[in-house]
């Protein structure tokens, strides 16, 4: 059976080698979805950081002979895209600074990805793909994911031992991405994509409508001091463990207040009772114009404004 290789360079390249966990998980999920639809084998690699999160029920493969030979490459809306730039090797070299254009292209390039997923005829050979595929409608079902991988049993046991209440009905996991999100993609989102205190206050009100007021909030963040200030009058526990433990805890939680990072978004895809998301995804300040990414919202989630 022919293989679909994950993007070796994006998994091992120094810029992403020790980070980008959420992006890598979305790439793997899309690869699983594509392999299932096309009757191919998803080809994953050993010794990458994201593998520490999962137990795999599939084989690992060595990389293909050419790690730059991509059959399909996702197009990103944050850059000016045209055939001339592609021809001269300058793809993703000129920033798209116009919000309405990015919103339009976010939908257009999602549709390209969906068309590739649903309607493409793959060649009779192994292929490799590149992209993060940050859209809900591109994701596989939980059953499809679990055919190949599940959160590591030892990690699950450790998380449930260290945070015994995380999966309780009256517990709420909360994620906040600070630090680099102050400036990430700021050439498009001029006021930043970093979520606001208003978002978390609105989310607390909404989740209390759903679950009552006797809640415990478990806080996960790269900027925990900021997040704690948003929950000053609430019953909170702050997580101080590793990133991979945090991802598993977010995955196990039955209720969640999400951030707009792929790290949280990927952990919150499945099996949630109450899920809160920021309205507009990255586009929190002009959400009325459209969401970026296009299908950021999980169908079972409640979208809450950040302003």
Image (cartoon, rainbow, N blue to C red):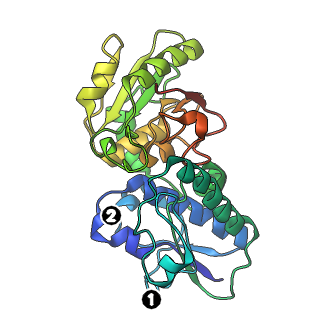
Quarter holding residue 299: top right
Residue 75 to residue 168: above or below: below
Identify the residue position indicated by label 2 in the image: 16
Name the element at disc 1: loop
Q: Residue at (34%, 34%) from the top-left corner?
A: 220
Q: Residues within 10 Å of mark 1 (few under 14, many from 20)?
A: few
Q: Residue at x 58, y 61 (%)?
A: 30
Mark 2 in CB contact with mark 1 (< 8 angstroms) = no
Looking at the figure, which quarter contains the N terminus? bottom right
Q: Position of residue 282 (x, y in %)?
A: 47, 42
For label 2, the crowd category at 10 Å Cα-Cα, with few meaning under 14, some 14 to 19 and many 20 or more, is some
The residue to which callout 1 is attached is 66
Total numbered labels: 2
x and y percent of residue 192 in the render? 37, 40
Q: Viewed as shown, does residue 81 lie left or right of 22? A: right
Q: Residue 275's spot in the image, x, y percent?
A: 56, 30
* Whether residue 123 can be seen here: yes
* 175 relative to 101, above or below: above
């Amino acid at each position: 059976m022919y293989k679909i290789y994950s993007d070796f360079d994006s998994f091992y390249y120094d810029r992403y080698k020790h980070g980008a966990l959420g992006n890598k998980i979305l790439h793997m999920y899309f690869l699983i979805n594509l392999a299932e639809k096309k009757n191919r084998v998803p080809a994953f690699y050993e010794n990458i950081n994201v593998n520490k999160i999962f137990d795999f029920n599939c084989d690992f493969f060595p990389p293909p002979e050419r790690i730059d030979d991509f059959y399909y490459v996702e197009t990103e809306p944050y850059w000016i895209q045209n055939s001339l730039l592609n021809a001269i090797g300058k793809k993703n070299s000129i920033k798209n600074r116009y919000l309405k254009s990015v919103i339009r292209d976010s939908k257009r390039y999602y549709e390209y990805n969906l068309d590739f997923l649903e309607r493409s005829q793959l060649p009779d050979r192994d292929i490799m793909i590149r992209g993060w595929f940050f859209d809900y409608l591109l994701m596989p079902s939980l059953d499809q994911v679990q055919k190949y991988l599940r959160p590591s049993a030892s990690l699950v046991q450790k998380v449930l031992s260290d945070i015994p209440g995380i999966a309780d009905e009256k517990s709420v996991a909360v994620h906040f991405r600070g630090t680099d999100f102050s400036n990430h993609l700021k050439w498009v989102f001029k006021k930043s994509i970093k979520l606001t205190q208003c978002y978390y206050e609105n989310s607390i009100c909404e989740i209390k409508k759903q679950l009552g007021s006797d809640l415990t909030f478990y806080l996960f963040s790269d900027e925990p001091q900021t997040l704690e200030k948003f929950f000053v009058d609430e019953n909170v526990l702050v997580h101080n463990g590793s990133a991979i433990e945090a991802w598993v805890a977010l995955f196990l939680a039955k209720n969640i207040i999400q951030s707009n990072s792929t790290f949280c978004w990927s952990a919150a895809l499945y099996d949630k009772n109450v899920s809160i998301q920021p309205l507009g995804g990255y586009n929190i300040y002009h959400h009325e114009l459209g969401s970026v990414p296009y299908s950021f919202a999980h169908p079972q989630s409640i979208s809450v404004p950040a302003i």
